[in-house]
Amino acid sequence: FHSFMLGIHKRLFELQKESGQDPLVLVAKEIADAASIICFDEFQVTDVADAMILKRLLETLIEHGVVLVMTSNRLPNELYLNGLNRDQFLPAIALIEDHCDIFPFPVDSPDYRMMGQESKTWINPLTEVTIDEFADSFAKLSKKKKIKSGVLEVQGRRVKVPAAAGGVAKFSFASLCQEAKGAADYIAVASSYHTVLIEGVPRMNENNLPLVRRFITLVDVLYEHHVKVVALAHASVDETYKPTQQNQCRDEDFAWDRTVSRLTEMQSDEYLKGAWRGGSGFLRRLEREAMTEQDLKRIWEVYDGDNSGYLSVGELSCLLADVNELKTGRRYVDESEVQKLFEAVHVCESEGIEWEEFKSYFRDMGGFLHILETHYHFTNGCVEPQG
């Protein structure tokens, strides 16, 4: 939902410069022309800019026959609770209640995300021993790669990356949550790195609500992009935010339950074995008519997920699935095509595609995306398997 609303605001800004018509109506029509059903996972409203346009946006989508399916941790009448100018959002609630069938889950429904086995990715408390453990984690994850700082460009802003190696980046909690950052900044991080280390997560209460809100949004974005997270914290996950007085009308108190659930699932073996979902966003950031050698190396480094120094068939398959998602919206790729490309690129005796092989093949054959589009037909030749 964060990504969807960011796209809406970006398109509104573009249309305001192009047309004298109501840009919100135009955006809704564009969406309706592209999709007959829209599913919002984890529908939540925390931003006043979103709250002010949602009623008209949803109303126009419904008028164009779009079917809405939404999941949320709140009932419609609890959305944007205590939000700024909430009275202006109430018509959106009435619209949802009038046009959607509401299916509330029982309060005692199990949270399946809480059933995963915890690993050592949330390291606490903060001591000399855990500081060394955290440093060792970064060293192991960034093996064989040069560690360097960098900058991500986000809508005219610069997000500093203190330390990164390939697809792994390390941030302090302060740099991510104490500075004025939002969902767009966190999406840029999640679309650039498959593994993020966060150092110095503090204990928080209701006196630190801006930090709590940013941390909740950060976790939401990292979870949605299936980014692996290693954190060094002062307290356990469920003790990290402890208000002196519980108040379920306070949005942060309510949302924190979801954050605990997600952070717990993110420590499970199943989550850690899952594929990164930020790849198509990462490639979109690099998409140009001609990639530089630096861009090409960045791709090779990021998809070398285990930092082995080469791309395996499985890692190459993830790369091609992300390219296909970028081009067509579908992730499926034919494994025979993956093997075909692997054998064409891999000419050394090592176990996988080394950087020099990767660079030489895509440089000599006409460019990264050009090769994938013209030789391997992922944009047009992909058919989803049936059943």
Image (cartoon, rainbow, N blue to C red):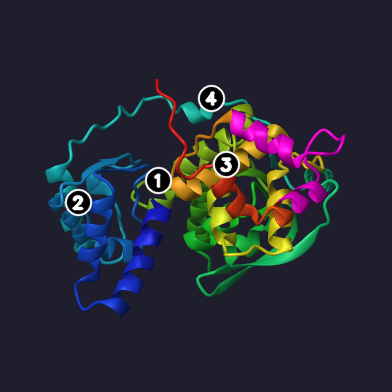
Secondary structure of the residue carrying numbered label 1: helix
Q: Which of the numbered marks, if any, corresponds to residue 115?
A: 4
Give, as a three-letter code, the residue at label 4.
Answer: Met
Question: Closer to the observer: label 1 or label 4?
Answer: 4
Determine which of the numbered discs, if any, sits on residue 376 in the image.
Answer: 3
Q: Earlier in the sequence, mark 3 or mark 4?
A: 4
- Residue 159, image quadrant: bottom right
- Are dots 2 and 4 in contact, CB under 8 Å? no
Q: Is residue 254 left or right of residue 360?
A: left
Which mark is on residue 254?
1
Is 344 included in the stretch rendered in magenta? yes
Start-end of magenta stretch: 336-361
Where residue 17 appears, x then y in whole percent? Answer: 32, 79
> In the image, 157: left or right of 132?
left
CB of mark 1 within 8 Å of CB of mark 2?
no
Q: If you read the primary sequence from the N terminus, does the residue marked by circle 2 or circle 3 appear first?
A: 2
What residue is drawn where x is 19% and y is 51%?
Answer: 93
Residue 151, picture quadrant: bottom right
Q: How far is the residue under mark 3 from the one under mark 4? A: 41 Å
- Can see residue 120? no
Residue 87: percent from left, percent from top: 20, 62
Magenta span has 13? no
> Which label is found at residue 93?
2
Residue 21 vs 312, above or below: the answer is below
Say what secondary structure mark 3 lies in.
Answer: loop
Q: Secondary structure at mark 2?
A: helix
Q: Residue furthest top?
A: 387
Front of the two marks 3 and 1:
3
Label 3 neighbour load within 10 Å: few <14, some 14-19, many 20+: some
Question: Could you tell me the amino acid type at mark 2?
Answer: Ile
Q: Main secondary structure of the magenta part?
A: helix
Mark found first going from the N terminus, 1 or 4: 4
